Image (cartoon, helix red, strand yellow):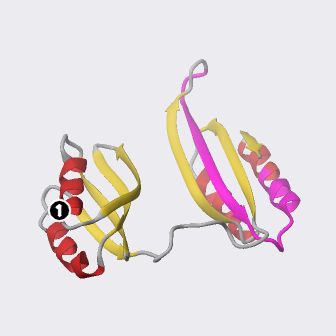
């Protein structure tokens, strides 16, 4: 069954997920996986949906009718579920916390890209620093290291970056 990857955004209010789920269900779709959150007053998410081939266009039309409630874009997805990483790719868990400052995500993602590391998931947030005042930035990243890349080299570069940014880094 074909998959659609839906990007969803709208003013946060009750009933948004229900309206989306109703449209998907009414067209024989199956809600497979999602990540959703309220961010700065907006409800935003990504949803993977499988839908019978002969009903995909009708589902797209139904989603378009939710305009005004949600802005939805449907992208074609892979026919098979995510599955494991390519042979030999190691999984890397990165947790980072420190005083918030511009450029943390840019610098960390650039370091990973230089080594060909692929980010699978990344969750970030800013929160109040409990005792020191100011804002803390937290990032939790799951990434895949290619078989031909030395994980120690990735770790070394991230540790040097953490020292420069004055952030705590845990790599597992």
Is 39 placed left or right of 80 in the picture?
Answer: left
Q: Quick one: 8 or 20, which is closer to the camera?
A: 20
Give percent across and percent down for residue 91: 73, 57
Q: Quadrant of residue 144?
A: bottom right
Asked if residue 75 is positioned above or below residue 24 in the image, the reply reads below
The image shows a total of numbered marks equal to: 1
Q: Secondary structure at mark 1?
A: helix
Is 5 placed left or right of 160 in the picture?
Answer: left
Residue at 38% of width from left, 75% of height from top? 1
Q: Quick one: 11 or 133, which is closer to the camera?
A: 11
Asked if residue 97 is positioned above or below residue 67 in the image, the reply reads above
Boundaries of the magenta span: 132-158
Q: Quick one: 122 or 160, which is closer to the camera?
A: 122
Q: Is residue 152 magenta?
A: yes
Residue at 59% of width from left, 40% of height from top? 138
Q: Is residue 88 magenta?
A: no
Q: Quick one: 14 or 42, which is closer to the camera?
A: 14
Specify the farthest residue to the top.
131
Give percent across and percent down for residue 77: 42, 75
Is 161 placed left or right of 79 in the picture?
Answer: right
Assess disc 1: are there few (<14), some (14-19) or many (≥20) residues with their C-alpha within 10 Å of its C-alpha. few
Residue at 30% of width from left, 59% of height from top? 8
Q: Quadrant of residue 52?
A: bottom left
Give percent across and percent down for residue 137: 57, 39
Give percent across and percent down for residue 2: 37, 77
Q: Which residue is mark 1?
A: 26
Q: Quadrant of residue 45?
A: bottom left
């Amino acid at each position: 069954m074909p998959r659609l990857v839906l990007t969803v955004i709208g003013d946060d209010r009750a009933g948004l997920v229900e309206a989306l789920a109703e449209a998907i269900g009414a067209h024989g779709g199956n809600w497979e996986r999602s990540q959703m959150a309220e961010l700065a007053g907006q409800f935003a998410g990504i949803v993977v949906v499988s839908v019978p081939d002969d009903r995909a266009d009708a589902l797209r039309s139904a989603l378009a009718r939710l305009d005004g409630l949600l802005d939805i874009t449907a992208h074609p997805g892979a026919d098979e579920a995510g599955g494991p990483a390519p042979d030999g790719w190691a999984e890397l868990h990165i947790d980072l916390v420190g005083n918030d400052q511009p450029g943390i995500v840019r610098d960390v993602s650039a370091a990973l890209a230089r080594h060909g590391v692929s980010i699978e998931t990344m969750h970030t947030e800013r929160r109040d620093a409990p005792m020191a005042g100011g804002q803390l930035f937290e990032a939790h990243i799951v990434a895949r290291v290619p078989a031909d890349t030395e994980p120690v080299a990735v770790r070394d570069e991230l540790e040097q970056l953490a020292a420069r940014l004055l952030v705590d880094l845990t790599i597992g």
